[in-house]
Image: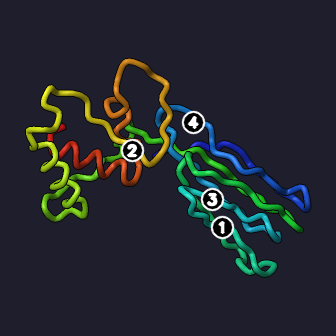
Amino acid sequence: IVAELYQLNVYSGLSGIFKSHVDTPRGRTHFGSLVIALPTKFQGGQLRVVHKGQERLYFEQPKWGSYGNAIRWVAFYSDCEHEVLPVSSGHRVALTYHLYVSAHMGGLTQPRLQIPNSKAYHVYCGVKNILSSPMVMRCGGILGIHCSFQYPVSEEGTYYYERHSLTLKGVDAAIFAVFRALGL
């Protein structure tokens, strides 16, 4: 993974707010953001991250200086909605990095499906049973899935997995591993 510094953010007083948004893809290997909150005194200014309706708050500071000199950080996928809530006092200082998959540095590896020890074994068996039915895809065809995450697509003429299988996330990566284990 390569972390590329994007910007230094300073949120101060009542103007310290960053509206809810989803990051714009920064290239085919961009998959997330890393936010590092520096040890400054502030109130409010939590980072709110939402994915599939689940919300988490980060950088809460219930008391002045309660975290001392600790540097706090959070990383999240680029398709997560996020915002900085209003800073009511003090200064919230953070460094934001874009995260990229880096194949030239060894890359990430997709999960290897260890049959039958995998948590995805029931998915493997289900897909195998469906595909072995003579009623399924009798004339051939293309098998696709609906991904749980969003991915940037900028190239035409090839399928996503041929170009970017290492950037698949979570359940998408697990299903890809099942399909690959089945020789699809």
Q: Amino acid at mark 3?
A: Val
Q: Amino acid at mark 4?
A: Pro
* Disc 2: which residue: 168
- Location of residue 146 with respect to 20 vertically, above or below: above
| Residue at x 55%, y 55% (from the top left corner) | 76
Cα–Cα span, label 1 and label 4: 23 Å
* Residue 143 placement (x, y as % from top left): 26, 35
* Residue 50 placement (x, y as % from top left): 60, 58
Cα–Cα span, label 2 and label 4: 14 Å
The residue lying toward the viewer, choosing from 95 and 149, is: 149
For marks 1 and 4, the one nearer the N-term is 4
For marks 3 and 4, the one nearer the N-term is 4
* Disc 3: which residue: 49
- Location of residue 163 with respect to 46 vertically, above or below: above
For marks 2 and 3, the one nearer the N-term is 3
Displayed quadrant of residue 161? top left
Cα–Cα span, label 2 and label 3: 20 Å
Cα–Cα span, label 1 and label 2: 25 Å
Cα–Cα span, label 3 and label 1: 6 Å
Mark 1 neighbour class, 10 Å CA radius: few under 14, some 14 to 19, many 20 or more: some
Label ID, residue 25: 4
* Residue 140 placement (x, y as % from top left): 16, 27
- Determine whether the residue tagged by mark 3 lies in a helix, strand or loop: strand
| Residue at x 34%, y 38% (from the top left corner) | 165
Callout 3–callout 4 Cβ contact below 8 Å: no
The residue lying toward the viewer, choosing from 174 and 40, is: 174
For marks 1 and 2, the one nearer the N-term is 1
Q: Amino acid at mark 1?
A: Leu
* Residue 86 placement (x, y as % from top left): 83, 61
For marks 3 and 1, the one nearer the N-term is 3
- Determine whether the residue tagged by mark 4 lies in a helix, strand or loop: loop
| Residue at x 17%, y 33% (from the top left corner) | 137
